[in-house]
């Protein structure tokens, strides 16, 4: 049986496939996330397709398949590979190749990017895929089952529709050096907030931007509870263990007594939570409880309160409780992207920069051609369901009887 050959270039191992037709290279485990991010090697690594290139799919597809370099992705002694199309990749070694392990590693880097100022959403399990790094520095994406992976694959091989191609037009690039700086900044924050779950925090941000406010509030509040638990352990539990009072430490660890709301109150009284943060936490907690216990859908400002409170807490932890505004810029980026956020009309009518005509339908004045009409005459339900009136009457809730003596 043929065995793969292993070659080394510097510190990198290049493995050949047992398939003799497959060029030498390295198997990868990859991840992509929304939105599309173009990562340039440096300031001279430009991306400037024309509108004609977009319409005809004649843009530089090779660049979208090219690696831009490496960053520190928490997988030492290996580096994490970054593709020009924003994909992240690691060697498909046993310790990285399990999908759940890869997802955790990639999402930590995505959260570090977000906290460092480069907006990104998280990766879902379906956003993890396989790839192959050729010795030429180009990457073949081999699989993928999500909308994100399908989009990247289609853009890479120029099989995407014009509607998808347009995302490549006027797209600003981020240099690899700027990306690495953002990851380092985010890592410095996240290192003071363990054990915050990157998947949950990113899910909260992703749902918020998508306008799924109930899901956003649920995930953001879970992250808030994780941050509060860390503050409680570090500032309350750890500081009473030296007083030698029997059972006191165990009492402070009792979740039945010290609920999250009680912990927030104590941390506030100790000056570890600021007044503005406390207000946001109260609003988010009330909305979360209303949703969990009554099914009441949260409003946008309530989900925004949870988002703001979370970033305040992370800022406080990262600054030794001296500054709650470290991540204000990041929070503003997220809030501005929310599709439920009202858009202000500053200049009157919106003028699109690019557009294309759409296929016209019967009923629109621009439609030309023959079509088969479909009569949509509305009829009352009772006309085809004689028992409808009786069923509606039975289903109508009865008024509650008044109590004796009630006004």
Image (cartoon, rainbow, N blue to C red):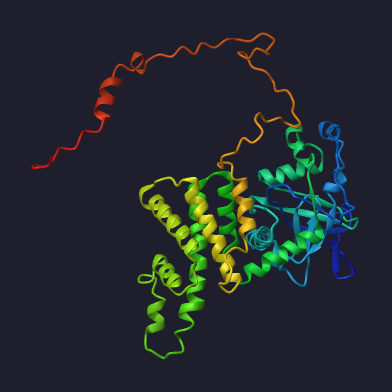
User: In the rendering, at what x and y percent does residue 145 appear?
Assistant: 67, 46
- Pick the residue in front: 178 or 100: 178
User: In the rendering, at what x and y percent does residue 342 appear?
Assistant: 56, 40
User: In the rendering, at what x and y percent does residue 129 appear?
Assistant: 71, 52
- Pick the residue in front: 59 or 329: 329
Question: Residue at the spot x=45%, y=47% of the render?
Answer: 298
Name the residue at the top extreme.
Answer: 370
Question: Residue at the spot x=55%, y=44% of the render?
Answer: 211
**Taking 328 as reference, is 75 above or below it?**
below
Residue 116, quarter of the rendered image:
bottom right
- Pick the residue in front: 245 or 284: 284
- Pick the residue in front: 273 or 39: 273
User: In the rendering, at what x and y percent does residue 339 appear?
Assistant: 59, 41
| Number of numbered discs on residues | 0
Question: Residue at the spot x=63%, y=67% of the render?
Answer: 190
**Taking 112 as reference, is 40 above or below it?**
above
Q: Is residue 217 visible?
A: yes
Residue 327, quarter of the rendered image:
bottom right
* Figure quadrant of the N terminus: bottom right
Name the residue at the bottom extreme.
Answer: 244
* Figure quadrant of the C terminus: top left
**Taking 173 as reference, is 164 above or below it?**
above
Residue 309 placement, left or right of 292? right
Name the residue at the front extreme.
Answer: 347
Question: Residue at the spot x=73%, y=56% of the render?
Answer: 30
Q: Is residue 124 visible?
A: no
């Amino acid at each position: 049986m043929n065995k793969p050959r292993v070659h080394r270039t510097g510190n990198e191992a290049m493995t050949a496939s047992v398939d003799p037709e497959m060029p030498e290279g390295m198997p990868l485990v990859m991840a992509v996330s929304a939105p599309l991010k173009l990562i340039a090697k440096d300031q001279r690594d430009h991306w400037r397709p024309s509108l004609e290139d977009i319409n005809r799919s004649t843009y530089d597809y090779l660049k979208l398949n090219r690696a831009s370099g490496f960053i520190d992705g928490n997988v030492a002694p290996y580096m994490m590979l970054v593709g020009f199309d924003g994909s992240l990749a690691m060697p498909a070694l046993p310790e990285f190749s399990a999908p759940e392990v890869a997802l955790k590693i990639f999402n930590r880097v995505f959260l570090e990017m977000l906290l460092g100022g480069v907006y990104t959403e998280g990766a879902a399990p379906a956003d993890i895929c396989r790839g192959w790094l050729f010795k030429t520095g180009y990457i073949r994406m081999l699989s993928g089952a999500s909308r994100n992976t399908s989009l990247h694959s289609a853009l890479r091989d120029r099989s995407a529709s014009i509607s998808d191609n347009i995302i490549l037009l006027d797209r600003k690039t981020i240099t690899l050096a700027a990306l690495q700086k953002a990851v380092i900044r985010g890592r410095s924050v996240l290192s003071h907030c363990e054990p915050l779950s990157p998947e949950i925090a990113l899910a909260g941000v992703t749902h918020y931007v998508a306008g799924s406010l109930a899901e956003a509030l649920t995930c953001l509040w879970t992250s808030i509870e994780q941050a509060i638990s860390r503050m409680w352990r570090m500032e309350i539990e750890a500081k009473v263990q030296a007083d030698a009072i029997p059972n006191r430490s165990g009492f402070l660890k009792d979740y039945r007594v010290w609920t999250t709301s009680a912990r927030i109150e104590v941390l506030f009284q100790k000056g570890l939570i600021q007044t503005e943060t406390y207000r946001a936490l109260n609003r988010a907690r009330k909305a979360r409880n209303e949703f969990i216990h009554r099914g009441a859908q949260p409003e946008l400002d309530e989900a925004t309160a949870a988002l703001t409170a979370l970033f305040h807490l992370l800022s406080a932890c990262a600054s030794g409780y001296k500054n709650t505004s470290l991540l204000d810029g990041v929070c503003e980026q997220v809030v501005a992207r929310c599709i439920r956020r009202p858009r202000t009309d500053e200049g009157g009518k919106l003028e699109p920069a690019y557009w294309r005509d759409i296929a016209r339908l019967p009923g629109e004045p621009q439609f030309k051609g023959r079509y088969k009409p479909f009569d949509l005459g509305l009829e009352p339900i009772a006309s085809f369901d004689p028992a409808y009136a009786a069923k509606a009457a039975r289903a109508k809730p009865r008024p509650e009887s008044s109590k004796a003596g009630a006004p």
